[in-house]
Image: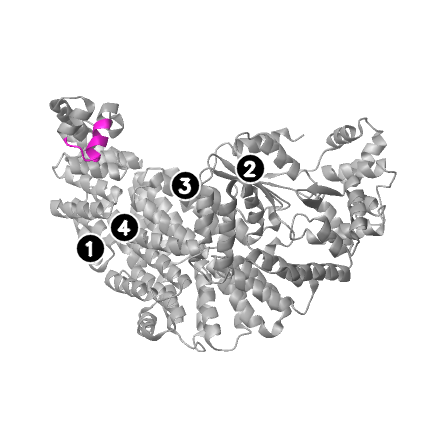
Amino acid sequence: MRRDVVERVVAALARPPRIVLVHGEPGIGKTHLLSEVIARLPGVRVLRGQALELDGGRAYASLASVLEGLRDEAGPALDALYEAVDRSAVGDVEASPGLLATRLFESLPGRTLIAIDDLHLADADTLTGLQAIPRYLSGFSVLATARQPPEMDADLTVRLEPLSFAEVADLVTESLGRTPSESVLRRVHEASRGNPWFVQETVRTLVQGGAVHSAVPDSRHGAILTRLFQRDQGGRDLARVLATLTRTRPGAGLPVLAELAGLEPVKAERALTGLVRDGVVTPAGEGYALAHPLVAEALYDELSAAERRAAHAKIAAMLERDGLSGTRRVLEWAAHVAESGSPDALPAMLRAASVTRWTAPLTAAHWYGKAAEISPGTAGELLARQALSYWKCSRPSPALNSARRALTLLPPGRRHTRTAYTAVAAALAMGSYDVALDILHGHLATADDTTALLAQQALISAVLGRPSADSARHARAGAAGCPPEDLVVALGCLAVHALVQGDWPECRRIVDDLLGRSAALPPGARLAALESAAHVLSTAGLRTRAAELLAQAEQIYRGLGWHDIGGQQIRTTAVLRRLGGEWTRALEDMASGARSLAEAGLMENRALLRNMELDILLNQGRYEEAERILADPPPRSPMHDGLRHVFRARLALGRGDRAAARAELDAALVLAVPDVLHRALSVKVRLHEACDEPDEARACAARLDEVSGNGTPRAVLSAHLAVASAFGDRARALAALESAREDGLPFEEGRARLLLGALGDHAQLPRAHAIFTRLGAAPWCAAAEHHMRAAGTAVERAADLTPGERRVIQLVAGGLSNPQIAEELHYSRKTVELYLTRVYAKTGLRSRVELALAVERGEI
C-alpha cells in the first residue's frame, strides 16, 4: 500500500537539503511510512526522534530526542552541547550552544536524515532549528510526520488519506491469514473509518471475543480500552502512569513505573508482563513505552481531571526529589507541575521561562503566556515579557497581540514604554503602518522616555511620505540620555529614517554612534545593534563593512541562540550576496527567505527582499519571473509604491515598451521619496538614451548628480554611471570603476567597464562581457557584445578557457613568476607568455594583479 507515496518521498530526499512532511490523522500509517522510507535510504545516517505531548514548553526537547541518536558516535560532544545549553540558560554568553551544535553537525561525514514523529507537538524552537539545519548544512535532510502541518516551509508535503474498503480487506486478510465474510469486513471498515491502526485494533478485539463497540463513546478508542479493561487494577494503573509520563519522555523503566503506580516490584513486573503480552506496551531501550500514541491518548483521556492532576503531581515530586540539574530537567518538571494544578505552578512556569529566555525565547514566550493565564494580578508584566520574547524571534503577530494586551493592564512606567515600542516595531515589521501610528499616538504622552517612540514615529512618517523632521530632531536630541535598552531602537530607526530621506552624512553619523555606544550594551542589545547597522549599510551599498558587522553579529548569535530580529538578517544577507555577485545563491536564499518572512508575518522586510530579487531577475533578463513578483503587492506606502514603479519601468524598458517605462518613472518621481528618486532618475537616463534623446538624458543625469550629493554610496555610484554615460565623461566612469572594485561590486564594475569600452577603451569590453556572463546578466552581455563587434573585437568567452590556460591562471594567482610557471609546467617562457596573452584576450584582464584578484573573487 501507498508505494507511490513512498516513491515520492524517497525521490524528494534524494538530493538534500530537503524538508519533507507527511501528515494525516493518528493511526493513518505515518510512522510506518517513515520506516519504509528509511529502509530505502542505504548509506544515510538516520537520527530518529519523537515529539511528545508536553514538548511545547520544553525548549529543543524534540530536537534533543533526535540528538540522542548520536550518543555512540559523538557522546562527549553531545554532553558538551547539553552543558552549554544549561550555562546559557543562566546568561553565560561564552557557552555558545549554537556554535557547538553547528560543529557537531558539521563533524558528521556523509548524508544525514533527521526523522522525527509527531512534529505537531514539537516546541517552537525545535521547529525553527529543523527549518535552519538543511538550509545551512547541505548534507542534511528532514523527514517528519505530524497530525496537522506545523509552521514550517517544507519542500514536499504529503497527506495520507484513509484506506479504501478494498485496502481494508487486504489488511484484515493479512492480519488474520484468511479473508472473513464481507459483513465482517464492512463492520471493520466502518468502525475503523479506514484508519490502518484501528483496523488492526478492531481485528485484535474480534479475535479476543470482544465487541467493536464499547461503552466508550468513540468506538475506535473503545477497541483499545476493551483490551485494557481485561487487565487487573494493577495493570490499568501502570498503563495510566505510563500514559501520563510519556507526555514528556518516550518511556520509563520498571522501578520508576512501580513507584509512580504505587505497586510492589513483583506486582508491577507481573502487570507489565501482561501489558506487553497484550500489545499495549512494548520494550523500548532500557525501559518500556506504550505501543502507539493513540494508546497513550485513550488511557490519558480515560483519567478524570483529579486523577490527571494527581499523576502529574507524583511525577513532578519524583523529578524534584532526584534533582533539577540542567535546563531539560527543569522544563520537564515545570511541565508536570503546570499540569498538576499545584500552588507551585506559577513559580515553576517563571523558572521555566527564566532558563529559556536567552537560548530559546519562543519557549520562554510559551511559559510567560501560561503564567499570565493563572496570575491575573501580574498578567500585564508577564504579557509584556511574552511580547518581547516573541519579538526576539521575529514573530511580530503574536508579539503585537501580547503587547497590546499588556498595554491595557500595565501602569505608566518603564515596562509600559518598552512594551509600547515593541508593539510599534512589530506592527511596522508587518507593514501595518496605521496600527503602529495608533499605538504611538496612544502612548507617547504617558511614556517615561519618548526617544524610541519618537524615532519610530519619524521613520513611519517618512515611509508614508509625511512630515517627519520634528520627530527625528527631538529623538536625536533625546538619544544622549535615553535608557540603554531604548538606545538601539531609537538609533536604528533614526538611521533608517535618514536613509529613506536621502541624508547619508546624517545616516552615517547615527550608525557610527550606534556602533560606538553598543559596545557597552548587553549581548542581546549589541546583537540587535549590529544587525541594524549591517542592514542600513548594506542598503546604502557598503558591502564590505556590512559583511563585517554581520559576521560580528553571528558570533553573538551563536552564544544566544536567537537572532534575525524583524527579519533583518535574512534581507541583509541577500543584499550582500546581490552586491557581491553571488546571484544564483542569492536567488535561492531569497525564494526561501521570502516564504519564511511571509509565514512569520514580516511583510515589510519581505517586500524589501523581493525588491532585491526583482533587481537580479531584471538584470538577468528573466522578465516573466519578475512580472510574477510584481503581481504580489507589498505593504502600501509611497516608498514601496515608488520602488515598484521603478521596477515596472525597468521591466517595460527591457521589453522595449518605452511609453510604459516613461509612465512608470513619472509616477515614481511624483511620489518624491528621496530613496526612490536616485533609482528612478538612473533608469530614466537609460530610457532617454534608448529613445535617442541625448539632451533629456544629460538633464536627467545632471539632476541625479545633484540629488546624490548627500546620498548613499549606492546613489553616488549610480550618479557616476549616469553622468559617464550621458556626458561621455571618462573620469566619472573611472570613478565608478574604482568604487565598485574597492568594495567588491562585480555588476557595477561590469557596467563601468562597459562604459569605458564604449568611450574608446576597447580592452575593457571583454572584461565587462566576462563579468556579465558569470552573473548571467543576459541583456548586459548582449550590450557588451554589441560594442565589441562595433570595435572589431572578437567575442571571446572566459568559459572557453582551455585546461592549460586555467592551469597557468591558477599558478599566476598563486604568486609564481613566468620563469617559475615555465619550470612547473615544463614550458618555455615564450609559451607561458603566449598563454597569458590568450587569457588576457578572453577575460579582458590586463595584468597579473587583475588576474589574481579575479581568481580570488571567483570570477574565473
Q: Is residue 473 magenta?
A: no
Q: What secondary structure is marked by label 4? A: helix
Query: Rounded to the nearest whole Å, what is the CA distance between mark 4 and mark 1?
Result: 29 Å
Give the residue type that dot 4 points to: Thr
Q: Which residue is mark 2?
A: 46
Magenta residue span? 807-817
Q: What secondary structure is marked by label 3? A: helix
Q: Nearer the viewer, residue 108 or 832?
A: 108
Vertical side of 500 occupied by 839: above or below: above
Q: Say left or right for 498 vs 21.
A: left
Q: Which residue is mark 1?
A: 703
Tell us which disc is closer to us: 3 or 1.
3
Q: Which residue is mark 4?
A: 544
Tell us which disc is closer to us: 3 or 4.
4
Q: Earlier in the sequence, mark 3 or mark 1?
A: 3
Quadrant of the rendering where the C terminus is positioned:
top left
Q: Which residue is mark 3?
A: 588
Circle 3 crowding by C-alpha within 10 Å: few under 14, some 14–19, many from 20: few
Query: Rounded to the nearest whole Å, what is the CA distance between mark 3 and mark 4?
Result: 22 Å
Query: Rounded to the nearest whole Å, what is the CA distance between mark 1 and mark 2?
Result: 62 Å
Q: Say left or right for 14 vs 651.
A: right
Q: Residue 248, image x and y in percent?
A: 64, 53
Most common secondary structure along the magenta stretch: helix
Tell us which disc is closer to us: 4 or 1.
4
Q: Are marks 2 and 3 in contact (CB under 8 Å)?
A: no
Q: Is residue 669 visible?
A: no
Circle 4 crowding by C-alpha within 10 Å: few under 14, some 14–19, many from 20: some
Q: Nearer the viewer, residue 319 or 567?
A: 319
Q: Earlier in the sequence, mark 1 or mark 2?
A: 2
Q: Are marks 3 and 4 in contact (CB under 8 Å)?
A: no
